[in-house]
Amino acid sequence: MRTHGGNIYDIVQRYEISEGDILDFSANINPLGPSPAAVRAAKESLSIINRYPEPSMTGLRTAVSRYFGINPDNVICGNGSIELIYLIPRVFKPKRVLIPAPTFTEYAAAAESAGAEAVLFLLSEKDGYRLDPVETAFKLKGMDMAFLCNPNNPTGQLVSRAEMLEILKYAAQEGVRLVVDEAFMDFTGSDSLVREAVQSSHLICIRAFTKFFGMPGLRIGYGVADAETIEALRSNQEPWTVNIPAERAAIAALTSWGHIRKTRKLIERERERLISAFRLLPGVEPFPSAANFIFVKLATMDSLTLTEKLARRGILIRDCSSFPNLDNRYIRIAVKTKRENERLVSALKDVLLGR
């Protein structure tokens, strides 16, 4: 089984810690949780769960289209973006898929499950694991598809919209279908390629309600592409993959503008506060981030040891040694509320100083 963050159930059993006493910095979820309107919509929908969900997801597709100012025919919904990550290579059957490393490990798994060769493009530590558009364009030669995460997980690096458009131009020239995972783009409020996706047969943008909208338990995501691509995906998608509470909550979340603005302000403020605090800790080197998490290099303690020591204190962080092209010197830490972040920094300081 591949490793992911957010496995609080294992820690509860292993260390006999109450679930309510655990602070989970290993999963990059909005610390404010879902909007009150989304929670209310999900609860109210329980009275109709004796019905099948609406097969074409018209209500949610319309809500997504209004959020971006696009046509509902350019939207597909799924059981989390993970369903779409696996559906896309299964439908389009690429032979070779380019995947940067480090990045979300499910891209390679999805490509290989569809019979494709996952070709890893190793990013350089000296460049901060940043994706270079020119180098990426060169790597696209001989590929059928490429998965790019922007901002990237676990590094938090953002490739600007202008640079992504350069990559898209080369992808189109080489006949490569570019799949851009924008799961964390809502935290930035800019640099998305969604509007370009509706016009290009070489681009699919995917997003989820997991991270920014704080609803990982409901499993709901969506993709945006040109109408022909969307039709091909929808015609090969299993029926009823999105349940009624998830759809209703997602529709409400997309119009919860007060919650959206509050989330962005909180993450921007607390991310910079955390980065500043990390720079004062011994043996800790934080990388710049455009997302709701911080990628950190360790100098005095390996990631497994640090992860275990913090877990015993009820604090979970993401050991990044399972990501391709990374080793046991790297961790990823989600940005949470000020009080929670202060508890993390205090515990980190104690562990690193051997207290």
Image (cartoon, rainbow, N blue to C red):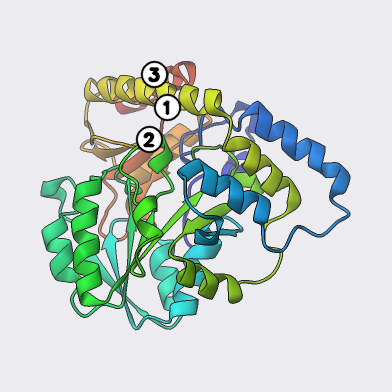
Asked whether 81 or 175 is in front, the reply is: 175
Callout 3: helix, strand or loop? helix
Labels 1, 3: front one: 1
Image spot of residue 316 (x, y percent): 48, 36
Q: Which mark is residue 189?
A: 2
Give the amino acid type for the residue marked by disc 3 in the picture: Ser
> Do tag 1 and tag 2 residues touch (Cβ < 8 Å)?
yes
Q: Secondary structure at mark 1?
A: helix
Q: Is residue 216 visible?
A: yes
Residue 126: image tag: none
Q: In the rendering, at what x and y percent does residue 145 appear?
A: 33, 73
Nearest the eye: 175 or 133: 175
Q: Nearer the viewer, mark 1 or mark 2?
A: 2
SS at mark 2? loop
Which residue has dot 3 on it? 346
Say which residue appears at 30% left-offset and 61% top-offset: 324
Which of the marked residues, 1 or 3, is nearer the chain's N terminus?
A: 1
The kind of residue on which mark 2 rests is: Gly
Pointer 1 residue: 264
Q: Are marks 1 and 3 in contact (CB under 8 Å)?
A: no
| x and y percentages locating residue 157 in the rendered image | 26, 43
In the rendered view, would you say 227 is above or below 354? below
Q: Is residue 13 visible from the viewing direction of this image?
A: no
Mark sitting earlier along the chain (3/2): 2
